[in-house]
């Protein structure tokens, strides 16, 4: 959505999966042992086993599109993306990078950055970083400096929050074609993707029961429309970047939009670009049961971020957020969370936290992350036109 309070700006991180015909099919799957399924610093094709890095990157570089997944707040996974970008660049110096983190309107600022015309501070201001993304910019700046150093074009893949918010309220078909930021009608989500999204929807505290019941809920269907809109926007951006000059388009995208090829790869296939490859980082603490043949074309073993290795306590509000004029809109509230206990609801607008105005997701993340065990955080919230005070009570140790 992007840090330590489980904010994920509207649960934007979703999935995708089958291997292209150009990738060799397999004999035996890798072992299921947590110590050996994906070795540290090694590449594994889920349906085949380990593969030498140079061989894999050379094959990937021959594709039209390569997508590099991530968990947005993982420094280690962003380091892996930079390493993989450098490897692909060695084989395809004509590549272009597409990034989920930027809405299309900031493309001129990206172009100025790559041309060396702005400082880092100016760039972050011109791209509205804290408002449109919110995660620590230093997680991404090494990739952006690499692109600038090598004059690699960077393409903004995302759309405005106003569009996703409208789709979330009204549904995709209710938005006139001339107000869709040029995005075409997405290919329908597969049944497997819909089931996955229904599980995500229920996990974020939305109403519903069994998966079949949730899928019939119009509110869930609008939620699905938003996810598929993101998938389509990213796919169209990557397809356009590739077709413009025949370059290799490399996407920097949340892993959930890529895993099992349900999301962006599915939309790329519908656009006629079946020659696309999904590469994912594999954190050392991820269960080997997740390493299914359809997960990705290949994964690379990385360390788990120290800050995510079961910390003794971390302040979590338990909400999904999106920027909105004058405040931050709560997109969903997790069950059994601090937010739920405080009475926060989907649709509430957080105006201030501890007396500090909160118009930026990143600012609220910072405030919550400073909360000590057992403390109370006062929040000013607008609901149905009225402002009220809410107290979020964080558990003690």
Image (cartoon, helix red, strand yellow):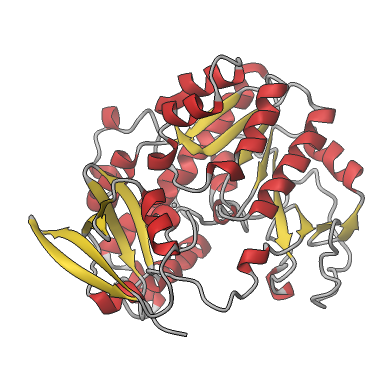
Q: Quick check: 106 above or below 300?
A: above
Specify whether residue 69 is in view. Answer: yes
Rendered location of residue 37, percent (x, y): 82, 70
The image quadrant of residue 320 is bottom left
Specify whether residue 186 is in view. Answer: no
Rendered location of residue 7, percent (x, y): 42, 59
Rendered location of residue 156, percent (x, y): 50, 30
- Pick out the residue farthest to the bottom: 397
Kindly identify the residue that appears in the image at 29 percent across and 72 percent down: 392
The image quadrant of residue 334 is bottom left
Q: Quick check: 91 above or below 69?
A: above
Kindly identify the residue that appears in the image at 35 percent across and 76 percent down: 375
Kindly identify the residue that appears in the image at 80 percent across and 76 percent down: 32
Q: In this view, does 42 lie to the left or right of 293?
A: right
Task: Please state which of residues 234 and 361 is positioned toward the viewer in this rendering.
Answer: 361
Kindly identify the residue that appears in the image at 56 percent across and 21 percent down: 113
Task: Please state which of residues 352 and 129 is positioned toward the viewer in this rendering.
Answer: 352
Rendered location of residue 91, percent (x, y): 84, 29
Task: Please state which of residues 380 and 230 is positioned toward the viewer in this rendering.
Answer: 380
Q: How many marks?
A: 0
């Amino acid at each position: 959505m992007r840090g330590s309070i489980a904010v994920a700006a509207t649960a934007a991180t979703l999935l995708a999966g089958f291997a292209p015909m150009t990738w060799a099919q397999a004999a035996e799957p890798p072992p299921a042992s947590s110590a050996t399924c994906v070795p540290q610093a090694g590449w594994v094709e889920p349906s085949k086993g380990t593969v030498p890095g140079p061989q894999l990157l050379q094959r990937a570089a021959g594709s039209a599109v390569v997508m590099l997944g991530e968990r947005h707040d993982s420094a280690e996974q962003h380091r892996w993306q930079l390493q993989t970008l450098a490897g692909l660049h060695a084989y395809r110096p004509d590549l272009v990078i597409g990034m989920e983190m930027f809405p299309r309107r900031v493309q001129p600022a990206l172009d100025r950055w790559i041309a060396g015309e702005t400082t880092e501070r100016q760039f972050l201001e011109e791209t509205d970083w804290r408002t449109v993304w919110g995660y620590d910019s230093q997680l991404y700046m090494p990739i952006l400096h690499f692109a600038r150093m090598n004059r690699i074009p960077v393409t903004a893949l995302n759309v405005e929050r106003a569009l996703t918010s409208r789709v979330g309220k009204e549904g995709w078909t209710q938005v006139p074609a001339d107000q869709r930021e040029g995005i075409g009608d997405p290919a329908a989500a597969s049944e497997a993707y819909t089931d996955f999204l229904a599980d995500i929807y229920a996990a974020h505290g939305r109403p519903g029961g069994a998966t079949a019941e949730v899928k019939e809920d119009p509110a869930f269907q609008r939620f699905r429309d938003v996810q598929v809109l993101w998938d389509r926007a990213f796919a169209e951006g990557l397809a356009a970047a590739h077709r413009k000059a025949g370059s290799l388009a490399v996407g920097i995208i949340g892993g959930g939009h890529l895993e099992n090829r349900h999301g962006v790869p599915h939309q790329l296939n519908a656009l006629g670009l079946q020659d696309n490859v999904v590469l994912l980082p594999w954190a050392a603490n991820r269960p080997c049961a997740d390493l299914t043949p359809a997960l990705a074309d290949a994964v690379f073993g990385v360390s788990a971020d120290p800050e995510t290795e079961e910390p003794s306590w971390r302040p979590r509000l338990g909400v999904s957020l999106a920027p909105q004029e004058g405040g931050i809109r709560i997109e969903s509230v997790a069950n059994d969370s601090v937010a739920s206990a405080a009475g926060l609801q989907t649709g509430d607008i957080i105006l201030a936290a501890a007396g500090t105005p909160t118009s930026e997701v990143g600012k609220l993340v910072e405030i919550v992350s400073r909360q000590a065990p057992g403390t109370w955080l006062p929040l000013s919230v607008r609901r149905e036109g009225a402002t009220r005070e809410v107290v979020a009570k964080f558990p003690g140790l």
